[in-house]
Image (cartoon, rainbow, N blue to C red):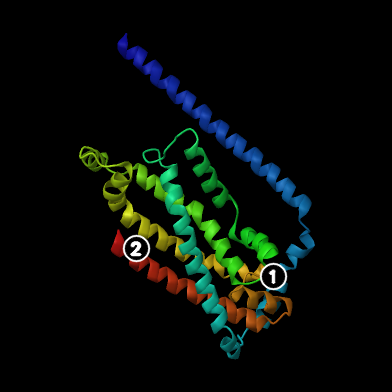
Amino acid sequence: MGQLDQSTLWHSNNRRHARIVWGFWFITVLLTVYCWQVMNEETMWVFVYDAPEQGADLLSRMFPPNWLYINQLYEALWDTLNIATLGTLLGVILAFPVAFLAARNTTPSTKFVRPVALFIIAASRSINSLIWALLLVSILGPGILAGIIAIGLRSIGFVAKLLYESIEETNGTSVEAIESTGASRFQVINYAIIPQILPAFLSIAIFRWDINIRESTILGLVGAGGIGLFLSSSLNTLAWPQVTLIILVILATVVVSEYFSAKVRSLLI
């Protein structure tokens, strides 16, 4: 009798799982069909059919790159690196206390302070750096200052989220050992928590710097300085050989920064 009940229960769970899977795929198909209909309504297929020819024509005008134009890009590239580096530094400095306020084991209040910290993290991660730059350019005017602050505001959420998760995963034994000596809350954080999260913190900061290198290359499209300003100007004047060169410079910069950050993070982890 026990074996029969167990077999019946197994078949019941199996059928329930099959119905859930079938329902998931059915909803997925319906959503796909609906999205396809919406896309068809908004798409002018006459341009899509002509896209290969237009793409080939554009590529023919983009090559060869205008290599002589590179002399005008050195300063802009340096500005881009400064935007990414200083913006990352600003974001890391602001994210560090936010992370401690968001972590359950270090926040002063889980009912009031922690929700505010989590809101700051969510707001920072929800707004793209290009939107931050657009808002800041309208307030501060064009230039790299708007780009630095935009990168900094965007970095807060990324760094703080990963960092507060690392804080919550710290070893409680070390914390209890420090607390047993009568240490204050600040001393517990300084001697028990920070040493545990420091490698992760440095790795997160370097990883974010690598991401910011990519994001800072396009901030010039809205006037926030850097090499994106030259990209925007070349696009507006249809100087396609210059556009090709700028894209190659951006690609080389991203590859080098990613290689450097990967090497440094491998040493820290």
Residue 58 or residue 220, whichever sits in front: 220
Please give the residue where the numbered disc 2 appears in the rendered image.
Answer: 265
Q: Is residue 249 visible?
A: no
Residue furthest to the bottom in view is 68
| Callout 2: SS | helix
Asked if the residue under mark 2 is in contact with the one under mark 1, i.e. CB atoms within 8 Å, the reply is no
Looking at the rendered structure, which numbered label has been put on residue 134?
A: none
Residue 50 or residue 71, whichever sits in front: 71
Please give the residue where the numbered disc 1 appears in the rendered image.
Answer: 52
Q: Amino acid at mark 1?
A: Pro
Which is nearer the N-term, disc 1 or disc 2?
A: 1
Category of crowding for the residue at label 2, using alpha-carbon neighbours closer than 10 angstroms: few (below 14), some (14–19), many (at least 20): some
Q: Amino acid at mark 2?
A: Arg
Q: Residue at x 34, y 55 (%)?
A: 200
Q: Quadrant of the N terminus?
A: top left
Among the 4 quarters of the image, the one containing residue 208: bottom left
Left or right position of 206 against 153: left
Q: Residue at x 43, y 48 (%)?
A: 99
Return the x and y of residue 179 as percentages of the image width and height: 25, 39
Q: Quadrant of the C terminus?
A: bottom left
Return the x and y of residue 266 as percentages of the image width and height: 31, 63
Q: How many marks?
A: 2
Residue 57 or residue 181, whichever sits in front: 181
Category of crowding for the residue at label 1, using alpha-carbon neighbours closer than 10 angstroms: few (below 14), some (14–19), many (at least 20): few
Left or right position of 230 against 45: left
Q: Is 94 above or below relative to 69?
A: above
Q: Residue at x 39, y 70 (%)?
A: 259
Return the x and y of residue 157 as percentages of the image width and height: 50, 51
Q: What is the CA distance from the residue labelled 1 to the residue labelled 2?
A: 42 Å
Residue 109 or residue 57, whichever sits in front: 109
